[in-house]
Amino acid sequence: MNVEPGLADAAQLFKVLGGESRLALLWLIGQEPRTVGALAEATGLSQPLVSQHLRTLRDAGLAVSRRSGKEVTYRLADLHVSHVIADALAHVREPAGAEGASEEQSRHQEEEPA
C-alpha cells in the first residue's frame, strides 16, 4: 500500500510512541533535559529499563543525548516531537463530540458534492 509517501515511517513512529513509558519519558525530557537517574526517579522505572527505552527513542530519532563526564543527559530531538505529544494529550483530554470535531465534520460535508 503506497497511498502517501512517509505513511510507513509515520506508522513506525506511532509504534514507538505507543508505549506509555516511552511517551512519559519523552514528555519529561520535553519539559527539561534529564539524566537516566532523574528519569528513573520521576517515573519509578528501573534505570536499566529507562536506558532501554531511551535507546529505542534515540534510534527512532526522537531523543538525543549529551555526555558530560559519567552523566548522560537526554532531551527531545526537535520541537516536532513535543507538538505530537501535546496534540495527543489535547485530543484525549477533550470531551467526546467536542466543538472541534463538529467543525471538522462540517468542513468535510461542505467539500462533498451533493
Image (cartoon, helix red, strand yellow):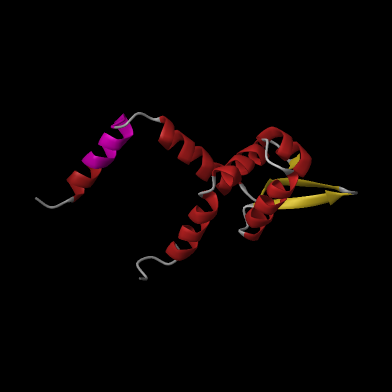
- Inspect the magenta stretch and tell me whether residue 101 lies in it: yes
What is the span of residues highlighted in magenta in the rendered image?
Answer: 97-106
Up/down of 74 relative to 5, above or below: above
Residue that appears at 68% across and 53% down: 52
Task: Indicate the position of residue 9 as horizontal and vertical percent values.
Answer: 49, 63
Task: Indicate the position of residue 26 as horizontal and vertical percent values.
Answer: 62, 43
Task: Indicate the position of residue 114 as horizontal and vertical percent values.
Answer: 9, 50
Which of 76/22 is in front? Answer: 22
Q: Residue furthest left?
A: 114
Which of 5/57 is in front? Answer: 57
Would residue 58 be found to the left or right of residue 72 on screen? left
Residue that appears at 76% across and 44% down: 36
Would residue 98 be found to the left or right of residue 8 on screen? left
Q: Residue furthest right?
A: 69
Would residue 79 be found to the left or right of residue 36 on screen? left
Up/down of 59 relative to 73, above or below: below
Residue that appears at 70% across and 45% down: 75
Report the number of discs: 0
Residue that appears at 79% across and 51% down: 66
Q: Quadrant of the N terminus?
A: bottom left
Which of 87/14 is in front? Answer: 14
Which quadrant would residue 16 be assigned to in this image? bottom right
Up/down of 3 relative to 102, above or below: below
Which quadrant would residue 47 be assigned to in this image? top right
